[in-house]
Image (cartoon, coloured by chain):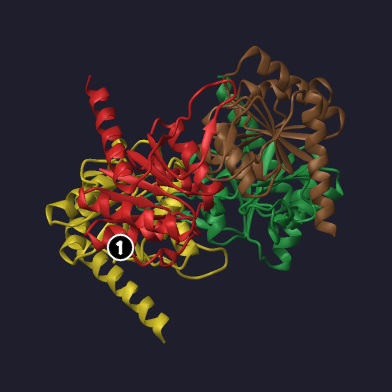
Chain colours: A yellow, B green, C brown, D red
Amino acid sequence: MIIAVIGDASCSTEEAELAEAVGEELAQRGVTIICGGLGGVMEASCRGAKSKGGLTIGILPGEDSSMANQYVDIPIATGVGYARNMAVVKSAQAAIAIGGNYGTLSEIAYALKRGIPVIGLNTWSLCRNGQKGDPIIRVHSATEAVDKAIAAVKEKVAEGLR
Amino acid sequence: MIIAVIGDASCSTEEAELAEAVGEELAQRGVTIICGGLGGVMEASCRGAKSKGGLTIGILPGEDSSMANQYVDIPIATGVGYARNMAVVKSAQAAIAIGGNYGTLSEIAYALKRGIPVIGLNTWSLCRNGQKGDPIIRVHSATEAVDKAIAAVKEKVAEGLR
Amino acid sequence: MIIAVIGDASCSTEEAELAEAVGEELAQRGVTIICGGLGGVMEASCRGAKSKGGLTIGILPGEDSSMANQYVDIPIATGVGYARNMAVVKSAQAAIAIGGNYGTLSEIAYALKRGIPVIGLNTWSLCRNGQKGDPIIRVHSATEAVDKAIAAVKEKVAEGLR
Amino acid sequence: MIIAVIGDASCSTEEAELAEAVGEELAQRGVTIICGGLGGVMEASCRGAKSKGGLTIGILPGEDSSMANQYVDIPIATGVGYARNMAVVKSAQAAIAIGGNYGTLSEIAYALKRGIPVIGLNTWSLCRNGQKGDPIIRVHSATEAVDKAIAAVKEKVAEGLR
């Protein structure tokens, strides 16, 4: 299973701690992490994953693999700028958003467009005109985020088998 | 001046009417329209613009210019899929969002990330965690949308000159 | 008709003169030019086209329309880096390559992959393993380049109608 | 070390055998393979690598990871179409081209543009106008291809340290 962790390259201490805990939790459950490969939330989640022996993939905007944070095992240098945001989420079965700015918002949009469940920790709220309900599954801790993400993936697989 | 009109390929009659009126209004003020080049809101805004002698650009996701709606003067076949959403807004000085689904949300995100003003007609509401206020400038008619979009562009230019 | 002019951002005086002449010739025949929007061959061909009242489109790699050369009428800021090379040729019905480095080679490859005829002026020679013949139509003057490009487009259209 | 294996989705039996042997050889030397993730040369090289316990990455053009061939360990669904060709080579330290059509030619171009050494097995010959010599390092066996690719990477690293 591959789960995306999305969030900004600059983040608060609280967000970094959440991201690190999410990374640890995912690795402990055998989930591979995919992210944008840079700093902030991306780096913290990779650091967490590596501390528990997980595998980490970083999808970089630029042309140079060496721009990846030091906790990325597999850096992918796309060269397509922020179009890489699409690749981050589409390569995952679910996405966990932590905090986040407009780049993260574009990743949330691409994930939801493709039917990939998005779990949110202190992130954007969305409301489509004239409609009730936010398409993001809102949670309040790293453990809950990982629980809900894995459950959402399993539910989608089960739906696919029906 | 180039202004993006963003919205879904499938839209309600009301949204199509709004988009057509926005296209007419932009053309009457000499503004070039850029959009995703397909149907729905994109087609309606181009139809409006052409009825008033405007110029229309369609940035297509696929490899085939002939996929553009018939009101597109200049079709650009990017071949980069929904990464073309980035090109639609980044080539404009402002964006007017009409209705819209997740693709439109990704365009709103890319525009705001780049500091391009987004004017909203019956579109997404956004709320960043722990922050007040929606970054989208909300309006209620085609004329108001075009007024606000042009004013926002002029304000940015004036800021740049200061 | 839209024809791409492809070549490097840094070029020799001879290449710039060829590019300018190609731009003039295309404009005189009512053909819109599409190019990568930057300097060198791209700028020279746009300058030529504008001197004869032609229309020019520049597909930029970056996020900033103001990076276009001053002879570009319609700058498209793709933000997808050199993936924009694909958009340059796929939006055209034929491509004229003048000189050129590896970026131009990638454009030639994308054009030929899509069945878009490539006319070459002092550009790459290609030879596929074990096969005779270069897929590039080789010419020796600006006028011949434009003649062959327009003829190739018309032939393709005629084939499509058969 | 990550080395790209590039070639067409449809290939001859001889090319498939070469690609499989290259995959085996790379895996035996502990090199991770990156490729376009689809069939033909891509699949054969991944099959070879997996038979020797190697790690394989597939950079897909589409939005669906399940399109990867069955020997891909890490499928990346970019959604950017053939712009993914750029990501395949830019994420590698060297590229081995086997046979190949225009897609492969675009990958060769992007690799050389970025200074990434390209080793060729029965692939394109290139000749820049007015210049001697083909920038592709030509070899005649899978073992020689892998030898030369690894040597080229080591030489570049050594140059970087000087």
Up/down of C80 relative to A48, above or below:
above
Left or right, residue A139 beside residue D125: left
- Residue at the (86%, 46%) spot, across then down: B52
Q: Nearer the viewer, residue D52 or B136?
A: D52
Up/down of C12 relative to C62, above or below:
above
Quadrant of the image containing the N terminus of chain C? top right
Left or right, residue B118 beside residue D51: right
Quadrant of the image containing the C terminus of chain C? bottom right
Whether residue A37 is visible, yes or no, is no
Q: Nearer the viewer, residue A75 or D47?
A: D47
Up/down of C149 relative to B44, above or below:
above
- Residue at the (80%, 35%) spot, across then down: C148
Instruction: Give how far across and how far down residue D115 sits, in percent.
Output: 40, 30
Residue D71 is drawn in which quadrant?
A: bottom left
Residue type, mark 1 in image? Ile
Residue B147 is drawn in which quadrant?
A: top right
Whether residue D97 is visible, yes or no, is yes
Chain under label 1?
Answer: A
In the rendered image, which residue does mark 1 sit on? A2
- Residue at the (16%, 52%) spot, across then down: A50
- Residue at the (28%, 71%) spot, across then down: A150
Q: Residues within 10 Å of mark 1 (few under 14, many from 20)?
A: many
Residue B30 is drawn in which quadrant?
A: top right
Q: Residue furthest top?
A: C13
Q: Nearer the viewer, residue C81 or D83?
A: D83
Under circle 1, the secondary element is strand
Instruction: Give how far across and how far down residue C38 sits, in percent.
Output: 60, 26
Instruction: Give how far across and how far down residue C118 sits, in percent.
Output: 69, 38
Q: Nearer the viewer, residue C88 or B53?
A: C88
Instruction: Give how far across and how far down residue C135 sits, in percent.
Output: 65, 41
